[in-house]
Image: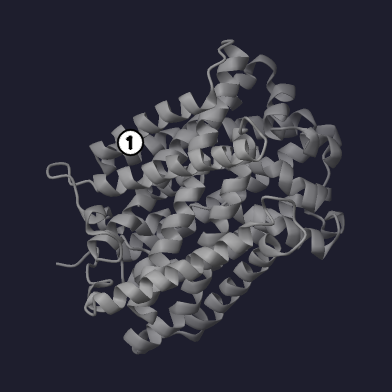
Amino acid sequence: MIDIAASTMANIGPAMSFFFGFSFLAVTAGVASPLTIVAAGIAIALLGNTLAQFSRAQPSAGGFITFVGKSFGPTSAVTTALLAGLGYIIAMAAVIAISGGFLQITASRYLGWDVPWIVWSLLLTALSVVMMVRGIGVSTKLAGLFFGVEMIVLVAVSIVAIVKHGNALSIAPFLPSHITGGVKGLAEGFPLAIYLFIGWENSAALAEETDNPRRNVGRAVFSSVAIMAVSYILFAYATVTGFGYDVDKLSASPIPFIAVARGSLGVLAFTAYLAGLTSTMGALIAGTNSQARLLFSAGREGLLPSFIGRVHPTRRTPTNAIFTFVAIALLIIGGWGLGHILGGHPTMDPISFFAEASTMGTILVMLVYLTSNIALPFYYRKYRPQEFSVLKHLVLPALGALAIIVPLYYLAKPGQPAPYSWFPYVAFALVAASILYAVVLTRRDPELGDRVGSLIADAE
């Protein structure tokens, strides 16, 4: 349980997510942006209930794909497999890019090296793939080690910053009256706060390699979400305090937490850069490990091409799924870069790409979250009516669905700058194409519905 919880939090990548996401959050929510994180933590906990309830009944590496497919049939399973796979791959492309981008920033600052970020990204990705192919035990523990390093640094910097500004501490970040724009500002910042937690569902995909998955997956999910929520609140409070509650200065900083580390630790600020590096590596390993297993499960059950569902003959790792996942992510980076060139921008900034790709990927993943919340009451009424609970299987997933609809609206609403204004249309096209593919596949393979969810993690 500790291993998969650590892997889950490494997948979230708190340093990476907070470094490159908090300034955007502060712009929308203002000084009281920590309250937005509180709201997002509650929303993710509601989603955690859905995942925990499904995993208790049907633990599987397929995760949401299996859960939705068992509830609504094979067409929904194939559609979910495609949307989840694409969403996670696009989001992981953002992680691959920012891993090289942040290493470029660090190497340039401390070593004077001017190596292009894409070179660093390819090198770090290759090293990560080697670790993942060696086995889940090795790679998960390595991701957990990286997570431990980043958390020690983040907490230390936050405490030092708060102590250093002790004479000016304020409760303003926790007062609703200090949210910029009131409820509207809270809602606009909500999608960004949700993004900080993306990866929280990592534990479910590792169910087949976990002891007692019916119990431990749920425990890992809730403990991970709780630890991350408390940690983000601490980091956010330290950051706004370090900037003297001046949101304009904070939002103008490329990486606000790094600026706070410099002001608080001086020459020891390099430790914050170290945290960023370990965070991107941990997220890259943990995220690909779990999300490639969703593709593996879908390939094994026939929802995706069967070669994806094969394992290494001796190491028993889903190597084909890992290679496919990483290859598509790299192609997305290349295609995105080509789009920048054709659009008159000769270079692609990895930080901008991180924001763009993570937003597009998050939209698709949120659609899967939404469908899973809707599926939970149907699943329990259909397969486990004697265990059905109005609170756990109806009220909480309904609240979870509502918590997802709000950020989806603000991610899709008109009037956003390009390329963000294109993303809702891209998402709609991908949903339509996925449904069409699913209909064709299920008609060609009538037995597909019997295979969805047929492999249980703890089956004898």
Q: Position of residue 177 (x, y in %)?
A: 87, 58
**312 vs 31, nearest the viewer:** 312
- Rendered position, 396 above or below 13: below
Quadrant of residue 67 within the rendered picture: bottom left
- Rendered position, 245 above or below 101: below
Tell me which amino acid carries mark 1.
Val
Task: Please state, as top left, top right, bottom left or bottom right, where the C terminus lies in the image.
Answer: bottom left
Pick out the residue farthest to the top. Answer: 112
| Res 67 visible | no
- Rendered position, 80 above or below 328: below
- Name which residue lies at 39% across and 83% down: 380
Coloured how? one colour
- Horizontal side, residue 236 vs residue 374: left or right: right
| Res 398 visible | yes
**3 vs 398, nearest the viewer:** 398
Q: Position of residue 64 (x, y in %)?
A: 40, 66
Q: Position of residue 141 (x, y in %)?
A: 34, 38
**360 vs 5, nearest the viewer:** 360
- Name which residue lies at 59% across and 10% down: 112
Quadrant of residue 282 within the rendered picture: top left
Residue under label 1? 129
Q: Position of residue 298 (x, y in %)?
A: 30, 62
- Horizontal side, residue 305 vs residue 331: left or right: left
